Structures are given as structure tokens and as C-alpha cells.
Image (cartoon, rainbow, N blue to C red):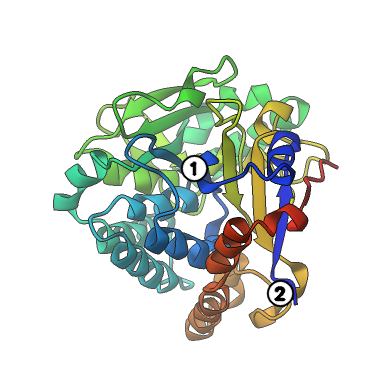
Amino acid sequence: MQRLCIRAGKRALEMIRDGGFRFDRVAAYVGPGVGPRWLAASGFDLTFLRSGVLGSKSRPVLLAGSSAGAWRFAAWLQPEPEKSYRRLLDAYIGIPCDRRSTPASLKRALQDVVNAYLEDDAIPFALAHDRYRLAVTAARAKSLAASETPWVQKLGLAMCYLVNRLDRRHLFRFFERVVFYSGPLPPPFCFHPGFRGRAVALNPINFKHAVLASGAIPLVIEGVTDIYGAPRGVYRDGGVIDYHLDHDYAARPDDVTLLFHHEERVIPGWLDKKIKGRRPSAEALDPLLVVYPSPQFVETFPGGKIPDRDDFVNCIDDPAGRILNWRKVVELCAPLGEEFVELVQSGRIRQAAEPLNLA
């Protein structure tokens, strides 16, 4: 059974079929803000951490993500990254969620997750990492979307949804993109004309707050207020703006952007999910290499699906069952990273890669 599907944008596909793709071509590894679906990426991440195929001292790789993607990549920068990542897996899978949960209690639960895998005294090491640069996207809420009063926030999000349907540019009336970054300078994509946001340097004080804010789902989890070094305000899930991918991360013509995903479709923002034809720009898609589990492989998962946020609701009275299912998915996906590395190093990726479907 084929377990991986590989799709590539025009420029990336040409490079792969010409035999020019190597891991040192990967300039950015992107982590989408897809909630529990990130568990299917765990085998990929752990293989990369063990093998060290991404990034070098001469050219660090950019780890760019929002929400779950940012959480994953924050572990990569720790002194013992594999141990940190496994602590994240354990803490995330075990998040308590019941009928009494509130946005405030869920925020405290996520703070516990962050504290479980990110140690305060390791943050200076993370900020000075010589092989990886981190870019965490959060959304600074404006107007009604900044309120913690449920009906007011719902109204703000409804208005945001409606104007976003007309044009994605209107989204920025309600949310400002804020990219928290490590390294001496903001990532190159922050200087592109269509960036529409601001970049804020990560530091020992704001590191955990930025990671937490990036996963603060509107209406579900309380926002994070007044992050040190950033504009004052309420910060929410970065996936509202950058859900899967919405940037050209390539700094050079031969750069590749790698995205381990749960599906082929690449969606710019969270509110774009139901908008047919809403996709990133051609410039962002051309250097993109998307890898995702095949539908046949996903059928072997518990319930025949990848974990998602609906599992919290569907298993509200059976958290042990949810935890068991999620751990099984992590176990099944463990070999995916090694399989992909072998495809690249053997050159068989040339036959496996297909054009990215833009429909």
C-alpha cells in the first residue's frame, strides 16, 4: 500500500524531475495550523530531528508555523529536541477537555502543555540555535474580534467571515498578522510587498507567550494579552490569517518550501476553508513540495480518519478512547519520515512526485 502522496508546485516539480532536489534545497519547513491533525506529522518531524537532514550552520532552515505548527517547531529548537517533542506529544494528547471546560480553563490547560515541553532556562539556547530559525504567527485581534464576551466575539468573527468572502484583504480589518521570529533579522517573507503585518523578535520573556497565543483558537480558548515587545492587544490563533500557507518562503530561485500536510489542498486562512478556489498565490505555490498520507493509509487509522478537533466533542464522555486513538495514529505514522527520506536519497522521488492540483 502506498502510504505517502507527493505533490509539487511547478518550479519544485521541475527540480525534482531533473534530479536536482536535495534536502539542502529546503529553505523553509512549514507547519500548518491544523489542530490535532499535526499528530500525523510526528513521525516526519522525529525522523528529521534524528537524521539532521534539514538546516545547516551556513544556512539555517526556517521553521514557519502557526498554531499546532508553531508548537511543533518550538520543540525543534530545544537542547534535547526529540525529548522535548515527545513531551509535547504526551502533553497535547492528554489535554483535559470535558463538559465543564471554558475558554479560560482551556487556556490554562494549554499553558500546562507549553510548560511541559518548553523549559525556561532552555529558551536562550533556542533563540541562538545555529541550524533552525523559528517564525511563529499570531493574529492580533481588532474591534469586536478582540472581545472575550462570547456573543460580541461571535459577531466580530461573523462580520470578518463575510467580508473575507468578498476579498481576503478585508480580513486585516479584524486581525493583524504578527510574526514572532528568532535570529538576527526577520525572515525574508516578512519583507515581501504583500506581507501585510509586522515582525517582532522573540526573546526569553515573550517566547512562551507567543507560542501559546498562536494556538489560542477564537471562541474556544482565551486570547493572550499584551505580549512583551509586541503591540498591545489580544492575540489569537495565527491560523486565522495563515492557516496552511500564504507566503513565498523561497529566498533564492532554487529554494524549496516543504509542507507535510493532511491533504493536497492548501488553504491560505482559516476562514477560507469553505471558499471554493481560494488558494495561495502562484509565487507561494511554485516552490512548494507537499507530502501527505494517502487516503488508503488514512483508512487504517482509528475511525478511518486523521485526528481533528471534532474528536474532543465526539469523545467528550470518553477521553480515554480519544487518547488511545490519537496514540495509535502517532504509532502508525512513525515510519513516514524515514520513508520520505529514503525516497529523496534514493532518487525515487522523481517517479513519486506529481503536479500539485490547483483546482
Residue at 77 percent across and 74 percent down: it is: 296
- Residue type at mark 2: give it: Phe
Coordinates of residue 248 in the picture (x, y in percent): 60, 29
Pick out the residue farthest to the top. 193
Marks 2,1: beta carbons within 8 A: no
Tell me the distance, in whole angstroms, between the alpha carbons under discs 2 and 1: 29 Å
State the SS at label 2: helix
Residue 359: % across, % down: 86, 42
> Which is closer to the viewer, label 2 or label 1?
1
Left-right relation of 299 to 324: right
Q: Amino acid at mark 1?
A: Asp
| Quadrant in the picture for residue 342 | bottom right
- The image quadrant where one finds the N terminus is bottom right
Rate crowding at label 1 as few (under 14), some (14 to 19) or many (20 or more) other CA atoms within 10 Å: some
Residue 308, image x, y percentages: 60, 65
Residue 172 can be seen in this image = yes
Return the residue nearer the eye: 83 or 311. Answer: 83
What's the mark number on residue 239? none
Image position of 255 with respect to 207: above or below: above
Residue occupied by mark 2: 297
Which of the two discs, 2 and 1, labels the residue nearer the N terminus? 1
Quadrant of residue 348 within the rendered picture: bottom right
Closer to the camera, 52 or 140? Answer: 52
Quadrant position of residue 89: bottom left
Which label was assigned to residue 24? Answer: 1
- Location of residue 118 in the rendering, given as x and y in whole percent from the top left corner: 26, 56
Image: 278 above or below 190: below
Q: Please give left or right for residue 331 compared with residue 6 in the image.
A: left
Residue 46 against residue 138 in the figure, above or below: below
The outermost residue toward the right is: 359
* Number of marks drawn: 2
